[in-house]
Amino acid sequence: MAGNFTAKDVQSLRQKTGVGMMECKSALQEANGDFDEAIAILRKKGAAKAAKKADRIAADGIVAVKIKDNVGVMVEINTETDFVAKNERFKKFSDCILETILNNNPKNLEELNQLKAYNSDLTVEKALQEEILTIGENIKIRRFVKLGGKLMSYVHGGGSIAVLVKFNDDADLNDEKFIEYAKNIAMQIAAANPQYLEPREIPQNVLNEETEILKQQVINSGKPENIADKIVAGKIKKFYQEVCLKEQEYVKENKLTVDEYTKKVSKELNKPIEILKFIRMEKGEGIEKRSDNFADEVSSMLG
């Protein structure tokens, strides 16, 4: 191989950095064979490469969650493909971001990006650029939330959906029966996707809009307007059962609502149980997916 390095040097650089063979070869050429300088060159190029990839849609990825000392953190990190989302390196990076948030108190993504990444000398922003350089896809830390208290978490589908649920202070997280109940509630939220905890949380404008839509549907179906309000009242109750966690049918025992299931377990444990809050995240929510086929894109690059 031409230059002051060999094919073995290129392979060693690739193993150390995780960067593609051609990029490693180019860096060694630029560094005139100096291994450490080649690493520095690859790092410097990381920012530029990250910028080039920034306009590529990252709608896959994972939602990850971690609880430590009664504090829970949930983060969504997006990638371009599910292949990368399943990569062990990417999972370690996600865990690093969770730990960084848990050990600090960033108010937003801007503050998070400037923090030192957990167990690293790099900021989160620089660590992200290195991941983009190494993995070769656009990666974005999209959002995160923190929640304190007596918590239960659940992650579905390897990170496609994650849930955090907060219970009242009487909750005993060492009681196996309560743990089973709390996990069931978290799974209910993941599966049924409630928007609110209970009807009183629904904003008035949302309720007014839903009422107006339902009333118009009843009138359009040919029902007399003078009985429309009575029919709409029944439909609003059905609406509550769809969007409010406590009003939903409990998925494992549909003769009970979630609220009735909670009261049943509370009686069995002889302790008051109350669901105070929940947060549900689904990867790629609201992101417009690209319509082109990624495999076709790769084929066109190779061709």
Image: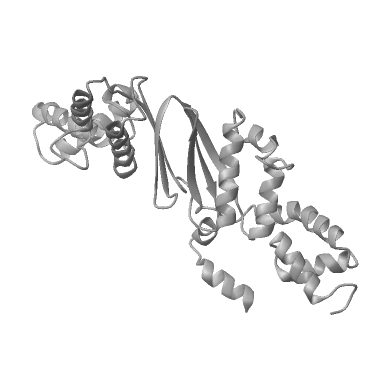
Q: Position of residue 289 (x, y in %)?
A: 48, 55
In-image side of 146 versus 257 (left or right) = right
The residue closer to the viewer here, 229 or 126, is 126
The colour scheme used to paint the residues is one colour
The residue closer to the viewer here, 91 or 212, is 91
The residue closer to the viewer here, 199 or 63, is 63
In-image side of 214 versus 134 (left or right) = left
Q: Position of residue 50 (x, y in %)?
A: 69, 53
Examine the rendered structure and indicate whether residue 98 appears above or below residue 234: below
Quarter of the image with the N terminus is: bottom right
In-image side of 288 versus 165 (left or right) = right
Examine the rendered structure and indicate whether residue 129 appears above or below residue 14: above
Residue drawn at x 12%, y 37% as measured from the top left:
255
Quarter of the image with the C terminus is: bottom right
Q: Position of residue 103 (x, y in %)?
A: 60, 31
Residue drawn at x 54%, y 50% as measured from the top left:
78
Report the number of numbered marks: 0
Examine the rendered structure and indicate whether residue 114 appears above or below residue 21: above
Q: Position of residue 250 (x, y in %)?
A: 21, 38
Residue drawn at x 63%, y 59% as measured from the top left:
135
Quarter occupied by residue 52: bottom right
Residue drawn at x 39%, y 52% as measured from the top left:
157
In-image side of 84 versus 6 (left or right) = left
